[in-house]
Image (spheres, rainbow, N blue to C red):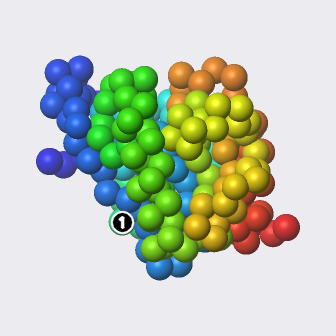
């Protein structure tokens, strides 16, 4: 299906439970972890694709990426190459697409945490940044976790919890997200220390 910029609610619903492949290669230094794909992400097969999601604008503002990425119609091969070339990878705690993250079960998030540990052991990024403190708390049974650098590590990677870039997270702006994402990017060597 060719990528496009708008979908009806009925069209988006057809992508429920679709899996979006990870964006990773052997040179990932910083692995961003979303909660799970939204329906728009599933429709375009592009992480953080929903219009209004602030992930890519925050990466650009922080200097983590060097060019604008507009994923709403589907990421181009050049966009994917740019991210991977900068040492950025993207995955999710839960693989299946839903309209909202709160449709996931506690068991799905915990299983996703276990699968993330296995992925990190295989890919070996320097830093993992989980975008969403509530999902992180559930996935790793750490009910008191806060955003920022965590004491625990995943495999050999430093672990950060950063704010979720969804438009539903009204607490953060592109600027505050950029600041939060810059910390793990510096730790991973994607940005200068």
Describe residue 39's horizontal placement relative to residue 34 as left or right. left
Q: Residue 164 at x, y = what percent?
A: 59, 35
Q: If the image is split into quadrants, where does the C terminus sit?
A: bottom right
* Residue at figure coordinates x 71%, y 32% from the top left: 144
Q: Residue 103 at x, y = what percent?
A: 36, 24
* Residue at figure coordinates x 44%, y 64% from the top left: 118
Residue 21's quadrant in the figure? bottom left
The residue sitting at the front extreme is: 141
The residue sitting at the right extreme is: 193
* Residue at figure coordinates x 29%, y 41% from the top left: 96
Is residue 4 something one can see in this rendering?
no
Q: Is residue 2 above or below residue 22?
A: above
Q: Is residue 46 above or below residue 177?
A: below
The one nearer the camera, 179 or 125, is 125
**Secondary-structure class at tag 1:** helix
Is residue 152 something one can see in this rendering?
yes
Q: Is residue 37 above or below residue 62?
A: above
* Residue at figure coordinates x 38%, y 59% from the top left: 22
Q: Residue 35 at x, y = what percent?
A: 47, 39
Q: Residue 37 at x, y = what percent?
A: 37, 40
Q: Residues within 10 Å of mark 1 (few under 14, many from 20)?
A: few
Q: Which residue is mark 1?
A: 77
The one nearer the camera, 57 or 130, is 130
Q: Is residue 79 above or below residue 108?
A: below
Residue 72's quadrant in the figure? top left
């Amino acid at each position: 299906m060719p990528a496009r910029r708008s979908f009806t609610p009925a069209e988006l619903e057809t992508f429920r439970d679709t899996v979006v492949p990870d964006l990773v290669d052997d040179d990932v230094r910083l692995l961003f972890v979303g909660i799970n794909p939204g329906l728009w992400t599933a429709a375009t097969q592009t992480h953080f694709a929903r219009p209004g999601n602030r992930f890519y604008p925050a990466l650009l503002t922080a200097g983590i990426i060097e060019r604008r990425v507009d994923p709403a119609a589907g990421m181009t091969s050049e966009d994917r190459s740019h991210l991977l070339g900068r040492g950025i990878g993207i995955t999710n705690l839960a693989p299946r697409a839903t309209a909202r993250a709160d449709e996931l079960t506690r068991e799905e998030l915990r299983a996703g945490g276990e699968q993330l540990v296995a992925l990190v052991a295989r890919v070996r990024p320097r830093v993992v940044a989980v975008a969403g403190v509530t999902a992180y708390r559930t996935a790793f049974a750490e009910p008191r976790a806060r955003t920022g650098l965590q004491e625990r590590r995943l495999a050999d990677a430093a672990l950060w919890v950063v704010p979720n870039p969804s438009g539903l997270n009204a607490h953060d702006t592109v600027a505050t997200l950029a600041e939060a994402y810059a910390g793990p990017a510096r730790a991973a060597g994607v940005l200068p220390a």
